[in-house]
Amino acid sequence: MADHEFPENVLRALANEGNERALDRLADLADAGDRLDELSELLDEGSEQAGRLLTRRAVERRDLHELQRLSDAGSEDAGTELERLLGYGRRP
């Protein structure tokens, strides 16, 4: 299937109507454009994709404070990565 580009205003309208896939696409576009504030806003709107993308960035920087903030904002991936980086996921 071909990858199609859709105007962000159309994706935003769909996301506002509850379309989670459109919300994910907005997160992907914000990530590609390095628009971190927009990614954070999308996380606040409930975008799991935004949480994953922000988590990936925080892990790359080994930013424990950011991972904690993301975890507190509801990103399960951030909580998992924070525990992993802190060593809680290790087995004896």
Image (cartoon, rainbow, N blue to C red):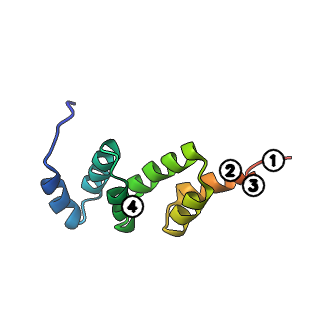
**Alpha-carbon distance for marks 4 and 3?**
26 Å
* Circle 1: residue type: Arg
Instruction: Please report contact status of discs 2 and 4: CB closer than 8 Å, yes or no.
Output: no
Q: Which residue is mark 1?
A: 91
Label drawn at residue 88? 3
**Separation of disc 1 and disc 3 at Cα?**
8 Å
> The residue under label 2 is which amino acid type?
Arg
Mark closer to the chain start, 4 or 3:
4
Picture coordinates of residue 11 (x, y %)?
18, 54
The residue beneath circle 4 is: 40
* Image location (x, y in percent) of residue 2: 19, 30
Ranked by sequence position, the earlier of labels 2 and 4 is: 4
Q: Which residue is mark 2?
A: 84
The secondary element bearing badge 2 is classed as helix
Expressed as whole percent of the image width and height from the top left, the position of residue 46 reads 37, 65
Asked if marks 2 and 3 touch (Cβ < 8 Å), the reply is: yes
Number of numbered labels in the structure image: 4
- Looking at the rendered structure, the secondary structure element under dot 4 is helix
User: Alpha-carbon distance for marks 2 and 1?
Assistant: 11 Å
